[in-house]
Structures are given as C-alpha cells and as structure tokens.
Image (spheres, rainbow, N blue to C red):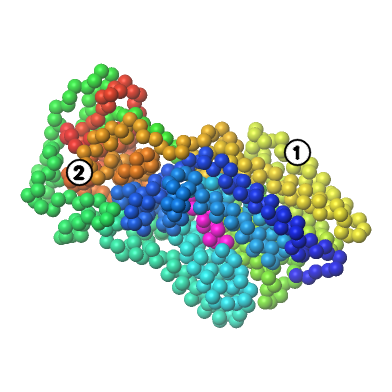
C-alpha cells in the first residue's frame, strides 16, 4: 500500500491510542456478551438437556445423546456440545456454564477480526471492523445462547487467518491448517461450516502466490484432508451397529449421513430441495440384529427377553403373529373416579393432567416465514431480519468496491485485493443464500457478520487514507456516510412505534457529517485537526442503531431461538432450571423400576423433565416428533420388559399416531388423587402401562 509523507502515521501504523481504543472495544464486547448472562437460564432446553445427558457417561458423550438413557441423539454433531460439557464439568452444570463457551468465542472473534483486518489495511481499519462486529445485534444475541454458531464463527475466522497466510505465501501447510479448521467447524454445525469454503478455495485458486498447477494440487490435497476431518466422527457413528448406539435424531434412516443431506442440508434450501427430491426415508431402528439376542450396550435401551419361557408382565398382550387372529383389547373395570375428576376415558382417549411448568414456548403456527419472512431479493431488509444484521450491509458492499479501487489491480494480487476477494466471496454467496433459503433461524445470520464488519473496516480505513491524501477517491467518504445513514433510516421505518425518534437524529447528523467532511477538504493543510473527529463521529452515528439493538438481548431474555429487537424488552428473566412439580413427583414415586422415567412425543416435552430430574426420558419421535424410531410392536416389547412404563402424550394429532394409538388402547389413564380439582391441560395426557385397560 502506497504511503505519503503528508499522511499521518495514525492512518498507517499502530500507535498507543490504537491500543487504548482496542481495549475499549474489547470492554464493550465483554459487557455485551457477559452482562446479565444468568437471566438466560438454560436458554435452548433441547441443547441443555443434551449436555446434561452427555455428562452421564462416555457413551452419551461420544454419540451426543439427547437423553440420559441413550435413546436418540441431538440433531447436531458433538463438538460444540463437548465444549459446553467441558465448561459444565469444570464450573458445574448451570445455565451460565453452558453459555460461557459461546460468549467467550464471541469476544475472541472480535479480537481476531481486528488482527485479520489491521494486518493488511492498518490499525484504523481493524478498529472499525472490530467495533462493527462487537455491536452486530444477531452476534450478541446468538453468543449469549447455547446455540453453537459463535463457536463456528470463531473457528471460521481462524480458518480465514490460515487461508490468508496460505494465499500470501503459497504454502501448502497453511492451506492444510485451514482445511483442518473448516473440518472442525463441520463437527460443530455440519454443512453450515462449508458456507465459507467456496470463498477460501476460490481465493486460493485465484490469488495464491504459486504456480497455477500447484494451486490445483494443493487444493486437491486440502480437500481430502477436509473430508477426513469432517467425516471422521460421521463414519464411526454410521458404522456402529444401530443397536449399540442411540437413534440418529432428525434422520429418516438412522444415519448421520442422511441427517447431513436431509434435515441439515436440503431441508434448508426450501424450494430447491423439492426440485432435487427429498431423501428416501429409511426404516425404524432395529432392536437387535436378525437372529441375534438383543444384548444391552452401555447407555443403551434394555432389550426384551429372548427366552420364550420367560413370563411377560401382568396384563401384557403380545403382538399378533402372522396368520393369527388379532387379539381384542379387554378393558378391565376402572376404579371409581374422585369427585371433580373428568369421566373415564374411552379406548383411544387419553387422560387429562396439569401441564409441566417451564416448558419452552411452542413454535408459532404456520411456516417458519413468520421468523424470517418470505424469500426474495429484499428479504434481508424485512422487519424480521433487517435489525439483526443488515444495518451496515449496503455500506459493506459500497466499501468493498471503493477499497478495490484504491490499489492498482495487478497480478499477482496485492494483499489488499487478496483480502477483499476473500471477504467478498465470503459475504456475497451468503446474501444470496439467506435471501432465498427455506428453513433457517435468524441466528444463522451471524455467519455474515465477520465479512460485513471486515469490509466496512477495510473500506472506511482505505477511504480515510485517500481522503487524508487529498485523492479524488476521498470524495467517496462522505458518500459512504450517507449510504450508511440512509440504510439505517430505511430499517428504522419498520420500528417507528418504538424508536422512530431516532430517524431524524440519524438523518440530520448523517447529512451534517457528510457536509463537514466535504467542507474540511478545502482547508489547508489537507489534514486538519478536525477531520479525524468528524470521521469518528460519523462512524459512531452509524453504530447508534445496531448498538441499541445489541443491548436488547442484555435487557431481556430470549425464547430459546436467539434474536435481538424491542420484543425482548418486555420479557422477564427465565428460571435458572425447570423445577420438579406434581407430575414429576408422581412419576418418580410410581416408576416401579422402569429404566425410563416417562416417554413423550418429542424432545420439546422431554427436555424440561430431563433438566429437572437428570433421569432418562424417552422422546419417541426425537426433536420434532417425526423420527421413525420405533414401531408399535417394538414399543410393546419395551413396555413388556419394563424399559418404560409412563407416557406423557399430546392429545392432538401428532406424527407418532401409531404409537399413541397403541398406548391409548393398552394402557390405563392416570388421574391425580391428591389434587382432583387441579386445572387440566387438554393437550397433555398421562398413561400408565403398568396398569392395563
């Protein structure tokens, strides 16, 4: 990068005030990540229950079992949960210990991004990038949660550091390190880690300082290393006999490979998935290999007795055999009901029971569009997503083009063009993906945050250098301020009822700062003592709105799916942990030696009970309730050998209709005797399969 004697050293070198400014930015990041962190409780109860189960034994730890009984896995790879489990092991199992790895990764990402930008574009650019990332709303929201996106972002930034050196030096070892880091990211959130891979490989192929054939050879070898690291755990799990491990949650055929391609792959692409075709569903998990006894494995379900002479539990009706007439279910006489209790249930009808407290909020009815909005070119600027990530998005694209003009294009590329190529290739495909993708949550947008912040920092740093030199490109600096201000005003029109007063403030200040920068250029000498404060004020004005949004997750707890925005301000802190209630006390007192305390339809219902008791709870259909884990005959065998006795089911139609029907027709309704007049929850019902109809 060219320099001139009339350019202040503050623009091109690191001075003491740069270090002070970096320290202040890190304090801001620490405050936003750690202040009032305990108000989040266990955040996502599904993930919190998984970590609690993983701490029970090594079998659950390796396979990332959702429940202590090793029945079904979580729908993500284990590495992010291993970090949370390590934190819980050291500091004790609590909400804060589960959130600590994400918050720490978020703070470290700010420092790492400063280094990545400052090493090429200067300390000023690095500071702007670090500050922009530190106050990105969705980053703060996600990093205060037990979702693993912040771990993935930090790993991706480490990979960006490695690929930057690989491009500059053309050295294979740095490219292989990048491949290893991306593979580690894959074991945190699967294919989401590959969102940055095209940028890394493309930048190396185009800009690495080595001959073209060596670039191709290096990338081929790095790709092999990438796949080895990425799929090592996948291969071990898929090659483990199904009866010796939990069912792979959210898969159709009980394999991690299908989970990667389906639930965590094509399902995220919406309409594109329907064009390609959905994965073929597989069968349910076998209880044992054909012809072999169902031996129990560590952390695995006990198998039904294999001896034909072993008596079945009282009242057990064995499944029908081929060619045998179906057995009629004989309902025994029901005891008299206490005063105030509902009438006896008919076959197929379930009893009423009070709801379990502290359950996570059910997802809203309708498509996930209620969270992300309809796909389209302007989706990232709708009311749901704009406040999360898009405050500086147009400015980042403007700055990328301006910074590219600042250095003469030549081959091999200068370091500035190498980095702009890298960050631009990181950002643009993600803009396209999130504009048109099907299934994703708002916190996934955190993957865009480093590239936006890096391009804003690099661009404004470069424009400030040109402005200070009196170059014609310096006229783009006031325009950049206006672009940023106009974007924020457009976003704020979605929220006029809450913070509409900010619109005229940003409009007036944005115009005044742009005018001041224009007027200051006519003063002699070119570098005036007022120009730096004016630019600093302009940057701070552009960060007012995202900073306010970033504070909302600190002031109010989220609902398990992190986001930032005014809706959070009315939410009270969540309890630190689900508590035992009358239902749980009843189950514990009447468990009767069953391995599982109770069975539910999905993980949403099972997670609070696991967190409250630490006992095995069977989620019959996995996370969403749709996993084909058991057939009715297999469920009957589990009931017969006292693996599970109680069922806490939903009366509404669900995706385990066959299992629900079997339970309703073969197990007795349970009514609480101690509090017969307690309020009922018509959607929840309890069955006792130790007592037969």
Q: As displayed, is residue 664 above or below residue 304?
A: above
Task: Give the number of callouts.
Answer: 2
Residue beneath the point at 26% across and 27% down: 671
Q: Is residue 252 magenta?
A: no
Residue 472 - label: none
Q: Which residue occupies 31% across, 64% down? A: 239
SS at badge 1: helix
Q: Which portion, as a residue range, is magenta?
A: 147-157
Q: Is residue 272 positioned above or below 569 on the image?
A: below
Q: Real-space Cα distance between discs 1 and 2?
A: 68 Å
Label 1 crowd bin: few (<14), some (14–19), many (20+), radius 10 Å: few
Q: Position of residue 458 (x, y in %)?
A: 70, 61
> Percent from the top left, x then y, of residue 384?
57, 43
What secondary structure is the stretch in magenta mostly built from? helix
267 or 610: nearer the viewer: 610
> Is residue 155 a member of the stretch shown in magenta?
yes
Q: Which residue bears the numbered disc 2?
A: 642
Determine whether 12 is above or below 100 in the image: below
Give me the residue at 14% from left, 50% from top: 305
**Label 2: few (<14), some (14–19) or many (≥20) C-alpha neighbours in 10 Å:** many
User: Of label 1 and label 2, which has the lower sequence position?
Assistant: 1
The residue that label 1 is drawn on is 504
Q: Quadrant of the N terminus?
A: bottom right
Image quarter hosting the C terminus: top left
Residue 433, image quadrant:
bottom right
Q: Quadrant of residue 654?
A: top left
């Amino acid at each position: 990068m060219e320099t001139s004697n009339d350019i202040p050293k503050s623009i091109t070198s690191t001075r003491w005030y740069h270090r002070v400014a970096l320290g202040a930015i890190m304090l801001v990041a620490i405050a936003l990540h750690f202040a009032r962190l305990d108000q989040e409780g266990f955040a996502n109860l599904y993930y919190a229950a998984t970590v609690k189960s993983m701490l029970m034994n090594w079998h659950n730890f390796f396979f990332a079992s959702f429940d202590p009984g090793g029945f079904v896995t979580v729908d993500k790879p284990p590495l992010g949960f291993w970090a949370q489990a390590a934190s819980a092991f050291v500091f004790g199992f609590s909400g804060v210990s589960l959130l600590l790895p994400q918050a720490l990764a978020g703070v470290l990402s700010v420092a790492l991004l400063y280094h990545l930008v400052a090493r090429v574009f200067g300390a000023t650019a690095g500071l702007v990038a670090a500050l922009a990332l530190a106050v990105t709303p969705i980053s703060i929201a996600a990093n205060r949660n037990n979702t693993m996106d912040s771990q993935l972002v930090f790993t991706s930034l480490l990979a960006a550091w490695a690929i930057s050196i690989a491009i500059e030096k053309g050295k294979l070892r740095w490219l292989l390190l990048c491949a290893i880091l991306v593979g580690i990211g894959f074991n945190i959130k699967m294919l989401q880690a590959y969102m940055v891979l095209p940028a890394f490989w493309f930048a190396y192929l185009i800009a690495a300082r080595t001959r073209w054939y060596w670039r191709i050879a290096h990338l081929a070898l790095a790709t092999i290393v990438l796949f080895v690291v990425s799929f090592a755990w996948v291969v071990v799990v898929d090659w483990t006999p199904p009866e010796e491990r939990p069912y792979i949650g959210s898969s159709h055929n009980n394999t991690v490979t299908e989970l990667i391609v389906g639930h965590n792959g094509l399902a995220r692409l919406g309409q594109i998935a329907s064009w390609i075709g959905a994965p073929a569903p597989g069968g349910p998990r076998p209880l044992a290999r054909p012809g072999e006894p169902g031996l129990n494995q560590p952390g695995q379900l006990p198998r039904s007795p294999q001896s034909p002479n072993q008596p079945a539990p009282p009242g057990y009706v064995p499944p029908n055999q081929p060619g045998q007439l179906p057995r009629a279910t004989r309902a025994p006489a029901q005891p008299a009901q206490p005063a105030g209790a509902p009438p006896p249930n008919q076959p197929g009808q379930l009893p009423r029971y009070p709801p379990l407290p502290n359950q996570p909020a059910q997802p809203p009815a309708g498509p996930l569009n209620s969270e992300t909005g309809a796909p389209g070119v302007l989706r990232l600027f709708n009311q749901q997503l704009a406040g999360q990530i898009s405050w500086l998005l147009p400015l980042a694209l403007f700055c990328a083009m301006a910074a590219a003009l600042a250095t003469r294009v030549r081959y091999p590329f200068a370091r500035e063009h190498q980095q702009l190529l890298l960050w631009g290739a990181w950002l643009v495909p993600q803009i396209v993906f999130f504009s048109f993708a099907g299934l994703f949550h708002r916190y996934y947008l955190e993957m865009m945050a480093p590239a936006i912040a890096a391009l804003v920092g690099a661009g404004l740093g470069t424009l400030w250098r040109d402005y200070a030199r009196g170059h014609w490109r310096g006229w783009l600096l006031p325009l950049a301020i206006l672009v940023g201000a106009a974007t924020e005003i457009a976003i704020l029109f979605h929220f006029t009822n809450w913070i509409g007063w900010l619109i005229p403030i940003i409009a007036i200040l944005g115009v005044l700062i742009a005018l001041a920068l224009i007027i200051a250029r006519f003063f002699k000498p070119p570098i005036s003592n007022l120009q730096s404060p004016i630019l600093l004020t302009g940057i701070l004005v552009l960060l007012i709105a995202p900073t306010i949004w970033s504070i909302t997750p600190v002031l109010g707890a989220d609902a398990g799916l992190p986001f930032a925005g005014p809706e959070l301000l009315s939410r009270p802190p969540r309890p630190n942990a689900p508590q035992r209630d009358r239902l749980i006390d009843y189950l514990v007192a009447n468990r009767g030696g069953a391995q599982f305390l109770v069975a539910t339809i999905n993980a949403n219902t099972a997670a609070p009970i696991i967190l409250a008791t630490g006992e095995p709870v069977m989620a019959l259909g996995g996370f969403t309730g749709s996993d084909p884990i058991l057939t009715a005959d297999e469920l009957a065998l589990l009931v017969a050998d006292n693996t599970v006795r109680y069922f806490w089911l939903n009366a509404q139609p669900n995706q385990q209709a066959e299992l629900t029907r079997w339970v309703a027709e073969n197990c007795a309704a349970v009514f609480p005797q101690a509090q017969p007049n307690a309020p009922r929850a018509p959607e929840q019902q309890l069955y006792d399969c130790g007592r037969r109809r």
